[in-house]
Amino acid sequence: MRAKKNSAPVDRRAVLCGGGAVAFEALLASLLGGATPARAEGLGGPVPEVDRVAVRVLIDSYQIAVAPSSKTGNVEIQRFGWAIGDSPPGRALISEFGLSMHVESRSGAVARQTLVDFGYTSQALTNNGEILGIDPAALDALVLSHGHYDHFGGLVGFLKASKTRLRPGIPLFVGGEECFCARQWTAPPVPGDFGVLDRPAIEQNAVKITVAQGPALVADHAFTTGQVPQTTFEKLLSPSRMTIGVKQGLGCYPESLPEDERNAGAIPDQFRHEIATVYNLKGRGLIVLTSCSHRGVVNIVKQAQAVSGVQKVHAVLGGFHLAPYNEDYLKSVIVSLKEIDPDYVVPMHCTGEPFWEMARREMPQKLLRAYTGTRFVFSTLLKVAAAVWVRWPPSRPSPRSQSSTKNHPAVVSEFGVAQV
């Protein structure tokens, strides 16, 4: 089974100039009264370029504490070992079936930090953030890829724990009102309540919900894809059902949803609100953080290309949501990824081991393994890494004006490798 090429590529001007997002956001603002969401800053010109992108996997399914750090090409792969020091071992990194990524980017002397997704539990997110030295005060933006619990479950607890340290009014980018619908998990192995995003709790913690239904600029360095059209062979499997309406202050406003969903009651999730986060690394190409890829990893990458006008893809990282699919489907995805020809592919979360094994055979030089705690440093120019030992517990977090790579466990000076 060979993947069909996209015969109708997305036009960048059409993507950037669509007016639907503006109307949606205006309506949503009128519904919410005082809790008015912000309209995300759209892409009015070329996407920004950055000199360096460091992606730290805060939460994923597992960790190997003795995996060595390494480098390949222009990528430093920094593994985190143990949270140990002069005292006996205490806390350890928590792995769970959820995803969270912390991204540091640099353009010249300007640094930005963004937290993409929040894992399944706040215990894992706050614990791992403290161990890995993530300073909430240094964050410039938050991004939620979609409304599934394994991506937003840790959010509210993290906001409450970090409220006095987060920048007031920090934006939380979401792809649309569907993000707030209550959900039921309907797929194997066990159906049940899959939670609902607590909008009032988010707003009470001084976070500005920022609707990015179309492509949007994130912290001056990154951009979101906006909602992802299905333009390739990829098929959407809906593992959840979303309930339309608001109950006891929680849920989604029907008037703010697409017309065909407003009176539906409960419907299979189509993930129209799903967004990905993208960086444009100078001289290297796009770094695409897919998060979960319900709309298709190939569709997401093609949308990032269409939005940016940049065809070269440097890396694709995140969940590819391929665990439920058969071997022929995986082969089609591999074919399409090879046609796109990214320099690196970093599967995480919901991708599944069958894809990993197939990709290891088909594109071994491109494939990189991620664990909870791993940090991938992508740079325009390759620098030599210096192996260092870091101590636990961490010292007091550095001021916001300083680089967050200082005075933290397993986070060392630029392009250094942490070995713990």
Image: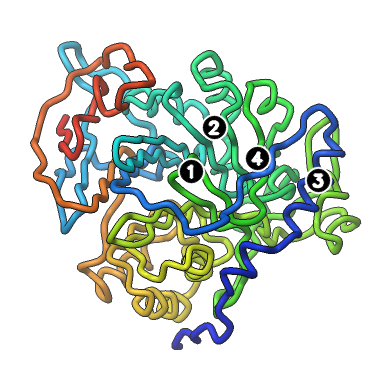
Residue contact between numbered discs 3 and 1, judged by CB atoms under 8 Å: no
Residue contact between numbered discs 1 and 4, judged by CB atoms under 8 Å: no
Residue contact between numbered discs 1 and 2, judged by CB atoms under 8 Å: yes
Spatial CA distance of label 3 from label 2 is 29 Å
The x, y position of residue 9, in whole percent, is 55, 79
Dot 4 amino acid type: Thr
- Which one is in front, 26 or 192? 26
Quarter of the N terminus within the rendering: bottom left
As helix, strand or loop, the secondary structure at mark 2 comes to: loop
Of pointers 1 and 2, the one earlier in the residue sequence: 1
Spatial CA distance of label 1 from label 4 is 23 Å
Of pointers 1 and 4, the one earlier in the residue sequence: 1
Of pointers 3 and 1, the one earlier in the residue sequence: 3
Is residue 143 found left or right of 133 in the rendered image?
A: right
Tell me where residue 83 sits by quadrant.
top left
As helix, strand or loop, the secondary structure at mark 1 comes to: loop
The x, y position of residue 269, in whole percent, is 70, 58
Q: Residues within 10 Å of mark 4 (few under 14, many from 20)?
A: many
Of pointers 4 and 3, the one earlier in the residue sequence: 3
Give the residue furthest to the right.
263
Dot 2 amino acid type: Gly
The x, y position of residue 144, in whole percent, is 57, 43
Q: Residues within 10 Å of mark 3 (few under 14, many from 20)?
A: some
Residue pointed to by mark 4: 210
Residue pointed to by mark 1: 98
Q: Nearer the viewer, mark 1 or mark 4?
A: 4
Q: Nearer the viewer, mark 4 or mark 3?
A: 3
Tell me where residue 347 sits by quadrant.
bottom left
Of pointers 3 and 2, the one earlier in the residue sequence: 3
Residue pointed to by mark 2: 154
Spatial CA distance of label 4 from label 3 is 12 Å
